[in-house]
Amino acid sequence: MKPLKPYLTYQEQINLLRERGMQISNEDYAIRYLHNYNYFHLNPYFKILLDTNDKFKPTTNFEDVTSMLHLDIRFKEVLWLYLQRIELKFKTSIAHSLAKSHTSYAFYSPQIYQSSNYYHDELRILETIKKRDSKREVIFHHENNYGGLYPIWVIVDLFSFSQVSLFYKNLKQKYQRLISSENYPGLGNEHLESWIHAAVNFRNVIAHLDHINERTFNISTISVDFFQRNNIESETVFKQILLISRLLDEEGFSMLLNTIKFAVENLNNDLSCYGFPNNWNTILTDFRKEKLF
């Protein structure tokens, strides 16, 4: 077993980068970034700039790293907004469809779940939330006025994105199809389950401040012929954006498209490091129209 790497001062970190071939013209600037962002957090960007001999490519400078970092930060902030929109639509869709078919008590209807085990799993999740957040006004209100029962639209709002994704997965296919057909035209229940799961994973990566520059996501999603026809195989950021584009409403999709266009055309950002092909606009637009089943 190898020993852990030793502690290095900021100056020693600068010296290490220089030993590996990085040009650093302004030490104060570099130290400020190392102090604020952490060498380990910047390491994925360092690795992108290394050659096969574990040395930095010729002419690599510290500003190359900070440029990648800031593009990553800005891009994640944009994507976060759309992932929030997807989460809210998904929760609303579940609540509306199930309340319409099984009243506001839908969550407590064992017949909507694939098994009694799943039903009791969901009850335990809700109880955990109620105990953890017992002082929240909405929980206090329902505990004292409705005997601790909650309408489906309140429950899905209390659930995290990950929890509501699991809730959908635990439903019988009949109810999964009801939700997908009423709220996601052209998207089957299996696609919805798989791609919502991918969106949850994507959201968690962004929320935990992980880098997404040149990242491949280790998640298996239901594929469609469109991906093969357009040579979209690896789980890049662009593929994640393709998936979430089908989960957005029309207004959200239009906003996403315009936001990316602005970033490319007005800010001169090269998004190839996120897996964007040259014809990304056409692919996104065509995928939006693609009949999946």
Image (spheres, helix red, strand yellow):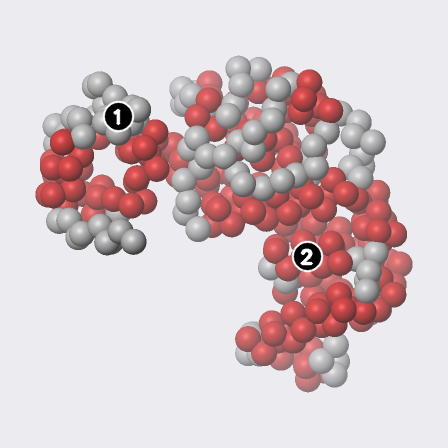
Q: CA distance from mark 2 to mark 1?
A: 44 Å
Residue behind mark 1:
53
Give x and y (percent) for residue 41: 32, 44
Dot 2 or dot 1, earlier in sequence: 1
Q: Does residue 4 sit above or below 116 in this rendering?
A: above
Give x and y (percent) for residue 214: 44, 30
Depth check, mark 2 against mark 1: the one in front is 1
Look at the image and tell me whether residue 285 can be seen.
no
Residue behind mark 2:
166
Q: Does residue 270 sit above or below 17 in this rendering?
A: above
Alpha-carbon neighbours of circle 2 within 10 Å: few (<14), some, or many (≥20)? some
| Amino acid on which the number 2 mark rests in the picture | Leu
| Amino acid on which the number 1 mark rests in the picture | Asn
- Tell me the quarter of the image containing the C terminus: top right
Look at the image and tell me whether residue 242 can be seen.
yes
Which of the 4 image quarters holds residue 150?
bottom right
